[in-house]
Image: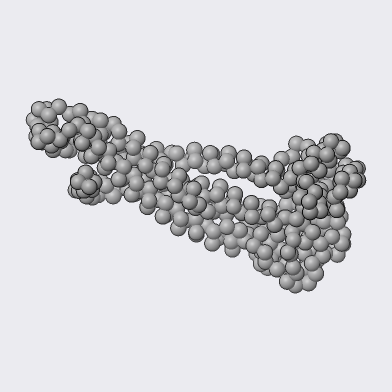
Amino acid sequence: MDLLHLALKNLLARPVRSLLTLLGVLVATASMVLFLSFGEGLRRALFQELSRVGPALQVLPEGVEGFAFGGYPGITPEQARALEEAARALGATGVIPSVFLVRGGFDPGTSFLFQGLPEGVSPEALYPGLEAAQGSLVPSPRGAVLGAKVAERQGLSLGASLRLSPEVRLKVEGVLAPTGGLADNLIFTPLGPLQKVLGTENYSALFVLLPPGLEAEGVARALEARVEGLKVETQGEVLRFAERALRISDLVRFGISLVALFVGGLLVANTVMMSVYERIREFGVMRALGARRAFIFRLVLLEALLLALLGGVGGLLLGVVGSSAINLYTQGEVGLALSAVTPRLALFSLGVALALGLLSGLLPAQMASRLPVVEALGRA
């Protein structure tokens, strides 16, 4: 306790310098927390959303990884028919072909994500629990059903017209009740209009429905063996792919935040080093009164650790506030919380802050503990 009290006293003796160093570490830690919180939020949102999806298997063209969204449809009608025959022979209850079409930019307010389904097939077959808040749940051949968020963002209601191309227009025939998931941001249409816009009869993906008790992994491998050119993924495989992708993105974001962390470490090292130079005579007196080298080493190192820890805690709190602000925006725009400060992330950020303080304080602590007593006492 005496060592801690002395370390705090030394830091408070230079309040402006200590405060500026704390702010540097705080900003560095907060930026790291915010960067990595996107990965945690996306991971949580993705896993929750996949748990709501009905089909046990997703079929994609070979070479396409993870998700059916985006890209040109690559599954031919012949492949779809062959897979449906094989799936029914293996006990599947149905195969639903689908086409995806993305219109607009990166801004959620100007983007449209269309999902085409066969005529007469309800979106509830893929997203269990969907209900129509207005109008119909199943679109007609020239109709569309909007998710709650996309209808709210675009100000669309029943009877509105959607222009997919100069030749293709759809009429809004239904608006879904909010679900808090991906379906809130989708526009469900029949397959035909989307295929016409894309100029193809191909499909983006096939969704295979399995009865309870039928092993998805075994069916997936059997389908791949029977139909060439297709990749069949279980929900578990999609989750594993998503986890790998998110880990890579986490590493990229952490690498970017290392720049700020490096600057924060330099601030801590500079503050502690300046403190050592200003207190050389003080250290000499302490050594002359019987203080050991190890005591001096621990004192200086503790000052660096305190600066880093306090800055880390402040940065973590600032990151939590920033994450909440981001979620307010994303929930309003797309109905999903895309940022999350989890206990794992909180512990990791504090661990990084402590490591920052440890590395920044080792050299100043080593110098302070090795000062010759006579030379230190001789300083003015």
In depth, the one of 16 and 293 nearer the eye is 293
Residue visible at 9% across and 36% down in the picture? 289
Percent of width and height locating residue 5: 21, 48
| Quadrant including the C terminus | top left
Residue visible at 38% across and 39% down in the picture? 355
In depth, the one of 219 and 363 nearer the eye is 219
* Figure coloring: one colour
Relative horizontal placement of residue 247, taking residue 193 as reference (left or right)? left
Relative horizontal placement of residue 120, taking residue 42 as reference (left or right)? right
Can you see residue 21? no
Can you see residue 102? yes
141 versus 342 height, above or below? below
Extreme-front residue of the structure = 213
3 versus 103 height, above or below? above
Residue visible at 12% across and 29% down in the picture? 373
Percent of width and height locating residue 71: 75, 44
Residue visible at 30% across and 33% down in the picture? 362
In depth, the one of 297 and 156 nearer the eye is 297
Say how many tags the image has. Answer: 0
Relative horizontal placement of residue 363, taking residue 121 as reference (left or right)? left
Percent of width and height locating residue 309: 34, 46
348 versus 371 height, above or below? below
